[in-house]
Image: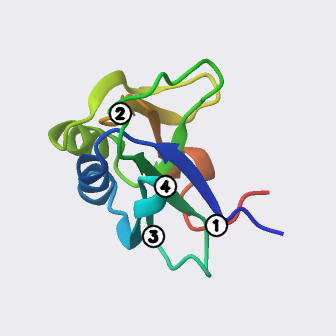
């Protein structure tokens, strides 16, 4: 068993795709309009869907924004250079939430909000996993 994707509902699909591509380096894997249901699905990732988990963006054509509710947490992305990645996200339209800092666990991280207001966590890989970011977790 494995996680296939995480779905977020977005108000402006093109703006959201641009953010995840430009700010976070994801690649649009596929996009399809569903006329009868009046929605579009777009899947983005760092690898093909058959190889790893991806992000599904759902745009309901008649909805421009969503109440994010109280249950949503955040998406987390591992980065090599926290300050550079944080600033790059801001330059690509993110809103600052928590500037880069060290948390009690010793992990360096920051938070931004994507164009729809979803929290995105940036975790510096070296601070979380030691000097070898590609090393699997225990």
Q: Is disc 3 placed on a helix, strand or loop? A: loop
Q: In this view, does 89 lie above or below 101?
A: below
Q: Is residue 81 above or below residue 98?
A: below
Observer able to see residue 101: yes
Q: Tell me which residue sits at (44%, 32%) in the image.
A: 118
Q: Is disc 1 placed on a helix, strand or loop? A: loop
Residue that badge 2 annotates: 116
Whether residue 22 sits left or right of residue 108 in the image: it is left
Q: Where is residue 52 in the image (x, y as percent from the top left)?
A: 61, 72
Which of the numbered marks, if any, corresponds to residue 135? 1
Q: Earlier in the sequence, mark 3 or mark 1?
A: 3
- Can you tell which of label 1 and label 2 is closer to the viewer? 2
Estimate the spatial distance between the alpha carbons at disc 4 and disc 3, rounded to whole Å: 28 Å
Observer able to see residue 41: no
Residue that badge 4 annotates: 37
Number of marks in picture: 4
Q: Earlier in the sequence, mark 1 or mark 4?
A: 4
Residue that badge 3 annotates: 46
Q: Which of 23 and 108 is in front in this view?
A: 23
Q: In this view, does 127 lie above or below 90?
A: below
How crowded pointer 2 is (Cα within 10 Å; few <14, some 14-19, many 20+) is rated as: many
Q: Is disc 2 placed on a helix, strand or loop? A: loop
Callouts 1 and 2 close, C-beta under 8 Å:
no
């Amino acid at each position: 068993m494995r996680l296939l994707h995480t779905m977020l509902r977005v108000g402006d699909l093109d703006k959201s795709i641009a953010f995840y591509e430009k700010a976070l380096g994801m690649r649009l894997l596929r996009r399809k309009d569903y006329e009868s249901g009046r929605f579009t699905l777009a899947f983005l990732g760092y690898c093909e869907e058959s190889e790893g988990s991806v992000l599904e963006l759902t745009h309901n054509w008649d909805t421009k924004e969503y109440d994010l509710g109280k249950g949503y947490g955040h998406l987390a992305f591992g980065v090599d250079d926290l300050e550079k990645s944080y600033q790059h996200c801001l330059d690509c339209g993110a809103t600052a939430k928590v500037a880069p800092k060290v948390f009690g666990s010793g992990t360096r991280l920051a938070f931004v909000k994507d164009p729809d207001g979803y929290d995105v966590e940036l975790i510096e890989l070296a601070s979380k996993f030691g000097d070898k970011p590609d090393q699997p977790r225990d």
